[in-house]
Amino acid sequence: MGMAATESQFHVLAVDDSVIDRKLIERLLKTSACQVTTVDSGSKALEFLGLQEHDKNHTNQPCVSLDNHQEAQINLIITDYCMPGMTGYDLLKKIKESASLRNIPVVIMSSENVPSRINRCLEEGAEEFFLKPVRLSDVNKLRPHMMKTKCKSHKQEESEIIVTEEKQASIEIAHVVPSEPPKETDTVQQQQQQKSQLLREAVNRIKRHRHRRFSDLAFPAILFIEITSSFC
């Protein structure tokens, strides 16, 4: 199987304490081109999902069957209702109470047709309630629910990419240091230096031309007066 085909698969977590039922649902899901992970209890399902640690007092080896990639995203959980310890209904409640897992579709299956039990699961957020033995026609009903998680996952990835790009753009803008405008003190100093230079030139010109007529010295004298008055 190629990489593209593997990435396009739906990943289903199947929970059932019955080995026979686990094998059956696993075969049906694989027939529908789904990637399957099976566990034999609700607590192990939560452990696989990262919601809680496995029961340390459990002496048996964990019965977890991983189909290729455990790190793949779970697109749907299908669980038996009647299981020792944590029931399928309890597992459903914990998943729906979790902020990180509540969007994963959950389907309940049971060998007992109890309307009150079915209604309670549907009211708690279950997408479907199947009667055992589960058939291929039942499994085919799961695809629309799994498609929802795929769409949400793609939208979330796009949003994360956009946020990352915006943060990167903000960082780049922050690193651009704008050129500082000339300080007011620098401008005043430059003007004073220019005036001082003109003043010195006017004084030197007057000193060089003392023997000339007044009309010849009128311009530097006037310049000298204007410059000195500007300092007042």
Image (tube, rainbow, N blue to C red):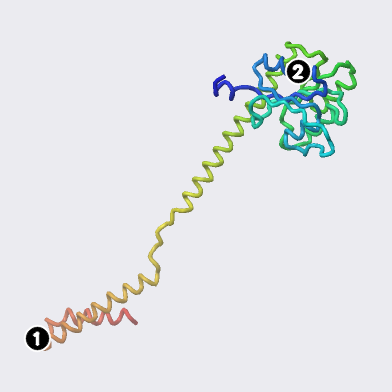
Q: Is residue 225 above or below residue 21?
A: below
Name which of mark 1 and mark 2 comes first in the sequence: 2
User: Which quarter of the figure has residue 38?
Assistant: top right
Tell me if mark 1 has few (under 14), some (14-19) or many (20+) residues whose alpha carbon lies within 10 angstroms of its own.
few
Q: For numbered disc 1, what is the local secondary structure?
A: loop
Q: Is residue 34 above or below residue 184?
A: above
Residue assigned mark 2: 23
Residue assigned mark 1: 212
Disc 2 residue type (three-letter): Lys
Q: Residue at 40% of width from left, 59% of height from top?
A: 179
Q: Position of residue 200 (x, y in %)?
A: 22, 81
What label sits on residue 180 in the rendered view? none
Q: Position of residue 113 (x, y in %)?
A: 88, 15
Q: Residue at 30% of width from left, 81% of height from top?
A: 229
Q: Could you say which is closer to the camera, residue 61 or residue 179?
A: 61
Lateral position of residue 118 relative to residue 74, left or right: right
